[in-house]
Image: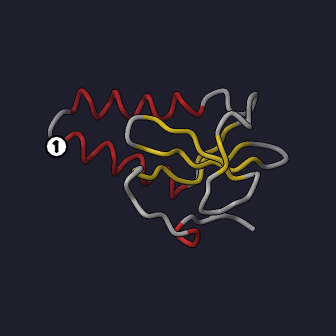
Amino acid sequence: MVKWTDHALAQLRHIHDYIAQDSPFYAKRVSEALVSKTIGLDGLPRLGRMASELNEDTVREIPLYSYRILYEIKPSHIEVLAIIHKRRDLQPDEIPREQ
């Protein structure tokens, strides 16, 4: 099962709203594509590469458009942690994670 954190959902809404300022059509398309990219991760959890900032085998990322979808492999599910723009300098402490 793939679960989204509140943080990741808030980022998805922000991305949608930002794009919708210019094009509601493409805002919906990008949002749906980001969600679709995570479907099936529970079957292929190691599909993405390790997120270099965290250097943990269980935290991985998959690219889509100009975004990185960060997710964590947990024993019972996959948790989408964040959606980050590729140009952003990501700091490890910016990604909220349950301990």
Image: 25 above or below 95: above
- Residue 2: image x %, image y %? 67, 38
Kindly identify the residue that appears in the image at 50 percent across and 34 percent down.
35
Kindly identify the residue that appears in the image at 39 percent across and 59 percent down.
88
Kindly identify the residue that appears in the image at 32 percent across and 30 percent down.
28
- Residue 62: image x %, image y %? 56, 39
User: Which is nearer the eye, 69 or 75?
Assistant: 69
Residue most toward the bottom? 93
Quadrant housing the N terminus: top right
Name the amino acid type tagged 1. Gln
Image: 79 above or below 32: below
Please give left or right for residue 26 compared with residue 11 in the image.
left
Kindly identify the residue that appears in the image at 58 percent across and 49 percent down.
70
* Quarter occupied by residue 65: top left
User: Which is nearer the eye, 26 or 63?
Assistant: 63
Question: Mark 1 Cα within 10 Å, few/some/many (few <14, many 20+)?
Answer: few
Q: Which residue is mark 1?
A: 21
- Residue 55: image x %, image y %? 69, 60
Quadrant housing the C terminus: bottom right
- Image color mode: secondary structure
Image: 3 above or below 91: above
User: Which is nearer the eye, 67 or 78?
Assistant: 67
Quick one: SS at disc 1? Answer: loop
